[in-house]
Image: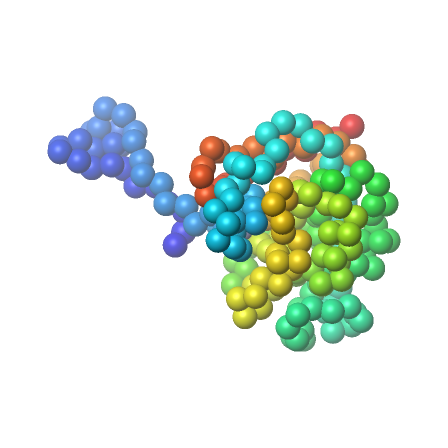
Amino acid sequence: MQTRAIPVERDGFIGAVNRGGGCNVSVANVDIHCTGTHTECVGHIDDSGIIITDVCPTGFISASLVSLETEIANETSENYHVPFCDEDRVITKKNLVEKWSGKSPEVLILRTLPNNENKKSLNYDENPAPFFTNDAIDYITHLGVQNLLVDLPSIDKADDGGQLGNHNRFFEKGKTISELLYIPNSVLDGFGFLQIQIPNWGLDAAPSRPIFYPV
Ligand SMILES: [Zn+2]
């Protein structure tokens, strides 16, 4: 299901000014995980009932923005919990060690290169996205990242047989993952302050609008 908004029609009322209604009133359907920037918590992968508003920071948090290249999966020695395909590309621990100091690690924003504007509308069913190796996620987890933000649809391969192996390696209560960001090239790598910004929705995830203020 795509994100869509339909005017309310009830008892002669139509919630669309351009169709004669007195105001615009829409019912929106949102496929949170598949259609746009969103932030999720451990409740995404377990039955704990933990919701995103329990754990998502509400104020400013200090963060690192790091850009890195992805690698051809079959050319790395790093591991993933299902076999790589020829076309798979991955973010590796090796990339992270080279590009990120690991300092101030609680909040990590990763931008994959090349950073084309088509990321805003790319169909990832037709253009499979890069994902993280298990080694990369273990490294991030080991360094203490609490809030991980990426411009990919998932930190896992789109179809890993339903295991969501990297999600399970990373998640515990208190942590969040934000996916499907778009980070303009005008925002440079480095330290800054971040607001994740979510609506007050009692679900495992919510649409989000992370704003990064470089310092
Ligand atoms: Zn998601």
Q: Quadrant of residue 9?
A: top left
Q: Position of residue 213 (x, y in %)?
A: 70, 29
The residue most toward the front is 48
Please tell me which residue is depicted at 51% across the width and 44% down the height of the picture: 50
User: In the shown orientation, is residue 38 left or right of residue 171?
Assistant: left
Residue placed most toward the observer, 186 or 137: 137
Q: Quadrant of residue 39?
A: top right
Please tell me which residue is depicted at 67% across the width and 46% down the height of the picture: 148
Q: Position of residue 69 (x, y in %)?
A: 76, 56
Q: Position of residue 72 (x, y in %)?
A: 74, 68
As displayed, is residue 34 above or below residue 59? below
Residue placed most toward the observer, 48 or 3: 48
Query: Dividing the image into 4 quarters, which one contains the N terminus?
Result: bottom left
The residue most toward the left is 11
Residue placed most toward the observer, 183 or 96: 96
The residue most toward the top is 22
Please tell me which residue is depicted at 45% across the width and 39% down the height of the picture: 202
As displayed, is residue 211 above or below residue 159? above
Q: What kind of colouring is applied to the model shown? A: rainbow
User: Can residue 18 be seen from the camera position used here?
Assistant: no
Please tell me which residue is depicted at 64% across the width and 73% down the height of the picture: 82
Query: Dividing the image into 4 quarters, which one contains the C terminus?
Result: top right
Q: Quadrant of residue 17?
A: top left
Task: Count every numbered label the image shows and give the total.
Answer: 0
User: Can residue 66 be seen from the camera position used here?
Assistant: yes
As displayed, is residue 92 above or below residue 37? below
